[in-house]
Image (cartoon, rainbow, N blue to C red):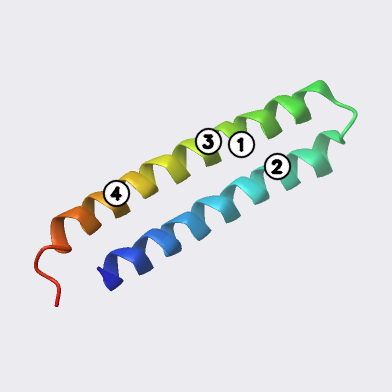
């Protein structure tokens, strides 16, 4: 269970960093007054929500699969 938790946290951190870099690069290139910046930001928020939801599903699946056998 601990290895799955560590994997989920590492994966979440990697995706979050990727989204931050994408939004940051868009902000530097286009500026916050651009409509495309807000489209990219909204896309990153939706993608982050999706990633968190999928990782939580993976973690909970592992938790349900292993709780019965834990001490």
Quadrant where the N terminus sits is: bottom left
The residue at the point 70 percent across, 25 percent down is 39
Mark 1 and 3 residues: CB-CB less than 8 Å, in contact? yes
Question: Please, which residue is most extreme toward the right here?
Answer: 33
Asked which secondary structure carries label 1, the reply is helix
The residue at the point 38 percent across, 48 percent down is 56
Q: CA distance from mark 2 to mark 1?
A: 7 Å
Q: Position of residue 9 (x, y in %)?
A: 44, 62
**Discs 4/2, front:** 4
Label 1 crowd (10 A; few <14 / some 14-19 / many >=20): some
Choose between 42 and 70: the one closer to the eye.
70
Q: CA distance from mark 1 to mark 3?
A: 5 Å
Query: In the rendered image, which residue does mark 1 sit on?
Result: 44
Q: Earlier in the sequence, mark 4 or mark 2?
A: 2
Query: In the rendered image, which residue does mark 3 sit on?
Result: 47
**Discs 3/4, front:** 4
Q: Is residue 3 above or below residue 20?
A: below
Q: Earlier in the sequence, mark 3 or mark 4?
A: 3
**Discs 3/2, front:** 3
Q: Is residue 23 above or below residue 70?
A: above
Query: In the rendered image, which residue does mark 4 sit on?
Result: 58
Q: Which mark is residue 32?
A: none
Q: Earlier in the sequence, mark 1 or mark 4?
A: 1
Q: Position of residue 31 (x, y in %)?
A: 87, 36
Image quadrant assignment for residue 2 = bottom left
Mark 4 and 2 residues: CB-CB less than 8 Å, in contact? no
Query: In the rendered image, which residue does mark 2 sit on?
Result: 23
Mark 2 and 1 residues: CB-CB less than 8 Å, in contact? yes
């Amino acid at each position: 269970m601990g290895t799955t938790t560590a994997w989920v946290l590492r994966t979440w951190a990697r995706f979050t960093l990727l989204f931050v870099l994408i939004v940051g690069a868009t902000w530097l290139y286009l500026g916050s007054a651009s409509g495309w910046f807000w489209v990219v930001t909204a896309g990153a928020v939706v993608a982050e929500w999706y990633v968190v939801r999928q990782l939580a599903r993976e973690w909970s699946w592992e938790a349900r699969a292993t709780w019965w056998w834990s001490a």
